[in-house]
Image (spheres, grey):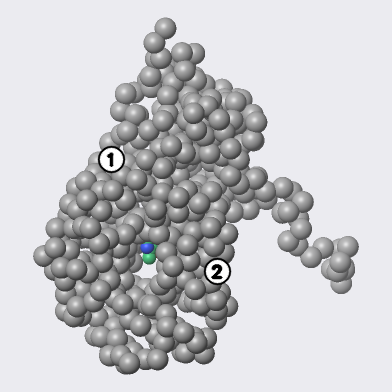
């Protein structure tokens, strides 16, 4: 019997490339059945199509290299700060972008070459910069004078830096994820960047090799990226330009983000027009590199018909904070009946005590019942990143699936670890 496929064939471009539906209608990712993964590893669970992720990294790497020989793709690791993902990115020849000491430690631990690590941040601590300098990372992105002062105290050998600029390009994305506009907290306006660059000329250790910018995330048109490249023109010529990440992705069959080819065509064409011919072009995608490779699996704990039909699962905004932060419109699927046409319109809700804990408004589900496994597609980016302990939720596990085998990449947090952060009555009396 031929495999039945999704109940909606358009799901094929929303779900991971190596998602399939078994003859009995069960969803598989990388050849692993979702209900079985849920039973083995517990839920909520982030499930990654490992080969899909690697394929996407290669498509980015080769696509950019084919259009601009002197270029580099860096994995914006904040989108999925999992040790295995750093190791895979490094193995696939990507550089790594980190935005803090924790991410830097993960990158170093993964075995990524330090010279391919970029450190960002608008409020870097002395400790972070010391760690970066000690590790000999390739590039530090300066956000202003404070970084220079700290580096002055730390450096005893040359360090390449980029200056983060505000390009004054505000893409049409939610305010929370727009970072390129005039009022951004990241980077320096162009005149201030110019002054800093002049001041650093002849500095004994700090070498300004170029500029960095990032306009925002989930950007759904290519034109703002072109304008951002054009904005750097007035600062003079440099060997390196890092133009950030931000390409949007499709979370729903109705969405139509630009394709990778359209994006790469646009930025490399703009770079050819504006940037010096032999300069190096760096991009640092996160979401568009990892989102589609991941789904999040939940167990249905409650189905009830009151004012509406509520299907309540064992996760929520503790593991998918974006539903509240960005009004994300995710695509749900009952993994036990992936080829069955939905017969129920429900509020797919989480278990956290917030009415914003609505995973999917008017979710179309096939005969949802307690004990089912429900997945949300395209949740590989920023879900794990933003996971938290709201209502005592434990941070979920992450599992990588490939050709029928699953490998644990992050263990689920335990209650002992959760309790262990607190200073309790056995160490300290709080009675009075
Ligand atoms: N580079 C820099 C300097 C960034 O700030 C970011 C994302 C990226 C690269 C990667 O952008 P991407 O390609 O992933 O769009 N909390 C939001 C996402 C915030 C993104 C922050 N910066 C969310 O959960 O969707």
Residue located 44% across and 32% down the image: 332
Q: Earlier in the sequence, mark 2 or mark 1?
A: 2
Q: x, y (%) of residue 30?
A: 47, 30
Q: x, y (%) of residue 84?
A: 53, 48
Residue located 86% across and 69% down the image: 428
Q: Is residue 279 visible?
A: yes
Label 2 sits on a secondary structure element that is helix
Can you tell which of label 2 and label 1 is closer to the viewer?
2
Mark number displayed over residue 197 = none
Label 1 sits on a secondary structure element that is loop
**Which residue is tagged 1?**
255
Task: Using the image, determine if residue 34 lies above or below residue 391.
Answer: above
Query: Position of 81 compared to 274: left or right?
Result: right
Do the residues bearing badges 2 and 1 touch, measured as CB atoms within 8 Å? no
Q: x, y (%) of residue 221?
A: 21, 52
Residue 281: quadrant of the picture: bottom left
Q: In which quadrant of this rendering is ligand 1 seen?
A: bottom left
Q: Residue furthest left?
A: 273
Marks 2 and 1 sit apart, C-alpha to C-alpha, by 35 Å
Residue located 20% across and 73% down the image: 232
**Which residue is tagged 2?**
101
Q: Residue furthest top?
A: 1
Q: x, y (%) of residue 99?
A: 47, 66
Few, some or many C-alpha atoms within 10 Å of disc 1 (few <14, some 14-19, many ≥20)?
Answer: few
Task: Using the image, determine if residue 91 lies above or below residue 297.
Answer: below
Task: Using the image, determine if residue 262 lies above or below residue 367.
Answer: below
Residue 216: quadrant of the picture: bottom left
């Amino acid at each position: 019997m031929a495999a039945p496929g999704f109940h909606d064939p358009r799901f094929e471009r929303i779900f991971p490339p190596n998602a399939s539906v078994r003859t009995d209608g069960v969803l598989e990712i990388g050849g692993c059945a979702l209900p079985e993964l849920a039973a083995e590893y517990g839920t909520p669970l982030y499930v990654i199509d490992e080969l899909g992720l690697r394929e996407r990294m290669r498509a980015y790497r080769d696509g950019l290299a084919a259009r601009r020989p002197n270029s580099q793709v860096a994995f914006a690791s904040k989108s999925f700060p999992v040790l295995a993902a750093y190791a895979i990115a490094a193995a696939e020849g990507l550089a790594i972008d980190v935005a803090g000491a924790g991410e830097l430690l993960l990158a170093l631990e993964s075995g990524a070459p330090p010279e391919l690590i970029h450190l960002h941040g608008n409020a870097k601590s002395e400790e972070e910069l010391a760690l970066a300098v000690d590790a000999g990372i390739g590039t530090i992105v300066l956000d202003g004078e404070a970084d220079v002062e700290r580096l002055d105290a730390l450096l005893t050998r040359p360090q390449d830096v980029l200056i983060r600029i505000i390009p004054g390009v505000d893409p049409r994305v939610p305010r929370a994820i727009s970072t390129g506009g005039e009022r951004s907290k990241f980077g320096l306006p162009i005149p201030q960047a110019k002054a800093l660059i002049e001041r650093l000329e002849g500095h004994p250790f700090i070498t300004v090799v170029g500029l960095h910018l990032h306009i925002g995330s989930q950007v759904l048109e290519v034109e703002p990226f072109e304008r951002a490249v054009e904005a750097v023109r007035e600062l003079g010529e440099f060997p390196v330009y890092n133009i950030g990440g931000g390409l949007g992705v499709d979370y729903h069959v109705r969405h139509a983000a630009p394709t990778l080819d359209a994006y790469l065509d646009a930025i490399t064409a703009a770079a050819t027009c504006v940037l010096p011919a032999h300069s190096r072009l760096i991009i640092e995608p996160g979401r568009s590199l990892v989102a589609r490779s991941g789904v999040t699996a939940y167990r249905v704990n409650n189905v009830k018909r009151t004012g509406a039909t509520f299907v309540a699962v064992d996760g929520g905004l503790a593991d998918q904070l974006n539903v509240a932060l960005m009004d994300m419109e995710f695509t749900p699927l009952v993994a036990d009946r992936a080829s069955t046409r939905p017969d129920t319109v429900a509020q797919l809700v989480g278990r956290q005590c917030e009415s914003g804990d609505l995973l999917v408004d008017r979710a179309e589900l096939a005969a949802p019942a307690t004990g089912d496994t429900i997945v949300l597609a395209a949740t590989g980016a920023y879900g794990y990143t933003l996971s938290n302990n709201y209502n005592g939720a434990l941070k979920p596990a992450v599992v990588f699936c490939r050709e029928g085998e699953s490998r644990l990449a992050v263990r689920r947090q335990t209650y002992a670890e959760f309790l262990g952060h607190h200073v309790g009555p056995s160490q300290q009396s709080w009675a009075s």
